[in-house]
Amino acid sequence: MTQKLTTVGFDADDTLWHNERFFRMTQGRFEELLSDFCEADHLHERLLAAERRNNGHYGFGIKGFVLSMIETAIEVTDEKVPATIIAELMQAGREMLRHPIELLPHVQDVIKELSESYRLVVITKGDLLDQERKIAQSGLGEMFEWAEIVSHKTPEVYETVFARHGDGPSRAMMIGDSMRSDIVPAIKAGCWAVHVPHGASWELERANPPNYSDRYFSVSSLQALPELVNAISQTDAH
């Protein structure tokens, strides 16, 4: 019998630990600061449009988010945004970069169990220093063989990472909360993929699930993951 799975990749933010809620809290503060200039719904649309424009320039993460907030503040105030608001937005960004790591339920036990039978890799995108900080502070680092911090998650990225740190995408699984970044491109690369939905989902990370693939699964909690991974891995592979 050939083991189908040898390598398991994990997304980090909102798969292993809380992250999106800090963006939501900061966006709430952003809306309060600019409430005299713009309605919250319209401000949300303008910020999302700025983030969509800027991702290719600044990448994903807190720094790009703060720059997009500042750009939006300049736009909606006709370039009259008070310097005090800019200063508050920059301070909010610094606070986000210092937020403590809070693991999601069952993460530590699941990672420990899987690490005993599989090669584990973190594949995450965002600010390099911030992602390195979170991995180090999570207490999970020693259970992962490697951490790849990438600018975008594409089929080619998954092919490269799983070839470098495993036995190729066909014998690898990717696990994450983002359908657009963690699941769809991993399936296109030939991996298995498991979607673990998170309550707070960023609009730019949404996509249709790859229901056409028999390598796609969804679980409501990471707690169900070891049983699923083992069931797939132990199935006779020809």
Image (cartoon, rainbow, N blue to C red):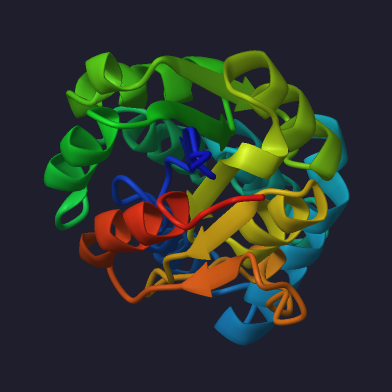
The quarter of the picture where residue 157 lies is top right
Rendering coords of residue 215 (x, y %): 63, 65
Considering only vertical position in the picture, is 15 above or below 128?
below
Considering only vertical position in the picture, is 133 above or below 158?
above
Q: Nearer the viewer, residue 61 or 78?
A: 61
The answer to whether 4 appears left or right of 46 in the picture is left
Rendering coords of residue 216 (x, y %): 61, 68
Q: Nearer the viewer, residue 31 or 140?
A: 140
Rendering coords of residue 41 (x, y %): 62, 85
The quarter of the picture where residue 161 lies is top right
The quarter of the picture where residue 128 lies is top right
Give the total number of marks visible in the rendering. 0
Q: Residue at x 42, y 17 (%)?
A: 132
Q: Residue at x 66, y 63 (%)?
A: 205
The answer to whether residue 59 shows anywhere in this view is no
Rendering coords of residue 137 (x, y %): 22, 21
Q: Residue at x 57, y 66 (%)?
A: 202
Q: Residue at x 31, y 59 (%)?
A: 225
Q: Nearer the viewer, residue 118 or 157?
A: 118
The answer to whether 68 appears left or right of 89 in the picture is right
The answer to whether 24 appears left or right of 190 in the picture is left
The answer to whether residue 191 shows anywhere in this view is yes
